[in-house]
Image: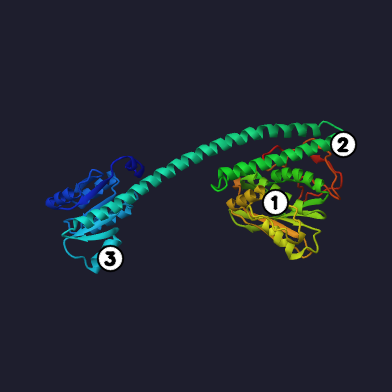
Amino acid sequence: MSLESQCEHKPSILVVDDKPQNLFALKKLLENPAYDVLTAVSGNDALAMALEHDFSVILMDVQMPGMNGFETANLLSLDEATKHIPIIFVTAHHADAKNISQGYESGAVDFLSKPLNPHILKSKINVFMALHKQRAELEKTNKDLAQTDQSKSEFLEEAGDSLRKPLFRIMGLAKRLLENGLDEQCKETAAELLEQTDRLISATDALFQYTSGEIKENRIRPKNFNLEHVLRDVDYVLGLRARERQISYRCTRDPNVPPLLVGDSTRLRQIMLTLITTSVKFSNQGDVNVHLDLLEDLEDRITLRISMREMGKKGKGGDWLNKALEILEPFKPLDDKEGFQCPVGPTLDLTVARQLVEAMGGKTGVEETPDGGLNLWFTAVFKKQPLKSLSVGAAPPPKRPASKVFKAKEKSVEPWKNGMSESPTGKALPSPTPFPV
């Protein structure tokens, strides 16, 4: 019987003694309408009854033929179903230090010597009955909270889907407009609509992930994916944001990084978009250079370090680095002393991104570069795809109709090719694969 069931039924006590007269006397002494008193004449009987009932406390004689009290208590302490039951040993003689030590090691919580003092015995029993009741109530409360949390998660998931569907519809319409040969002004408007819708989807996802506790439960869904496809989508969105800031943006990578991995590609895409966008926001001028390093290459897995190096902040020094470090602290307000203006604060997106990185076995950090810029980075661990699956998904991303979207300050962005995503000014960008961020 579970603690929750006993919370709704009368609790019980087990008295174990090989002498029937002792059992009768103790049962008579402990009679109480608030609880039942059950008896066992041997250690074996006590073990069997403990598996059928969740006793509030066990009173056990030490000296019994066959299996003595210490041996019985030791077996009870080894079983997950019975190890929580408190045991009070009853002995006919004054217990010496050796017996007391042996009793506690076998799972006892107290010793009583015969003849028993009725007042002391009942007082101890009442204490353990109260503790058992509290434990049962706590178990019931935890179960109710778990059910409530499950209901909340289901509601949030349904609400999130209701918000995302129209947003994805708007995004799809904006992409169609970009592909239909509009004039430059209409294309810019459609591109802005696409970019802002993407931001709203990202914020919506972050809100529901955080409030549902999804990240804390480490809901990372690993599966085979092609890193090239992820970077294609990321490059497209980030190119739009680089244009908005009028900065240059490029991506490079270690040629040893394998493209076919096992991990949560959706989460990786979300982390990259959030952290690289943060780096773009820091760049009021200059460049943002994204680079993938192979930090660790083991037989079955790799560790990637993705760095977002922001250029053109010379003269800011340590104060600027400290401000950048603060944005990684969840919900920590930025100190704006001496008129120091920071282009971005600690947002929900950043909080979620940092938690996702930790769930993927990685870390986040910020460091200052020798030229006064900032290097915002994160690491993540991915498994390698088995050799038999290397042919699956190995094809390059499919070509899609191109649409001229923007011209950055000096460079624009296109999907990764041969480890580089840098193109001459004005090169057309392909449409990205639809994805949630």
Label 1 SS: helix
Residue pointed to by mark 1? 275
Q: Mark 1 to mark 2: distance in Å?
A: 30 Å
Q: Nearer the viewer, residue 69 or 158?
A: 158
Instruction: Tell me, yes or no, if residue 304 can be seen here.
Output: no
Q: Name the image quarter holding residue 143.
A: top left
Q: Nearer the viewer, residue 277 or 181?
A: 277
Residue pointed to by mark 2? 184
Which amino acid, by three-letter code, is at mark 1? Leu
Q: Position of residue 389 (x, y in %)?
A: 61, 43
Question: Which quadrant is the C terminus positioned in?
Answer: top right
User: Looking at the picture, does residue 22 appear above or below residue 201?
Assistant: below
Label 2 SS: helix
Q: Mark 3 to mark 2: distance in Å?
A: 87 Å
Residue pointed to by mark 3? 101
User: Looking at the picture, does residue 405 appear above or below residue 42?
Assistant: above
Q: Name the image quarter holding residue 400.
A: top right
| Pointer 1 or 3: first along the chain | 3
| Pointer 1 or 2: first along the chain | 2
Q: Name the image quarter holding residue 335.
A: bottom right
Q: Hey, which residue is sitting farthest bottom in the picture? A: 97
Q: Residues within 10 Å of mark 2 (few under 14, many from 20)?
A: few
Which amino acid, by three-letter code, is at mark 3? Ser
Q: Mark 1 to mark 3: distance in Å?
A: 58 Å
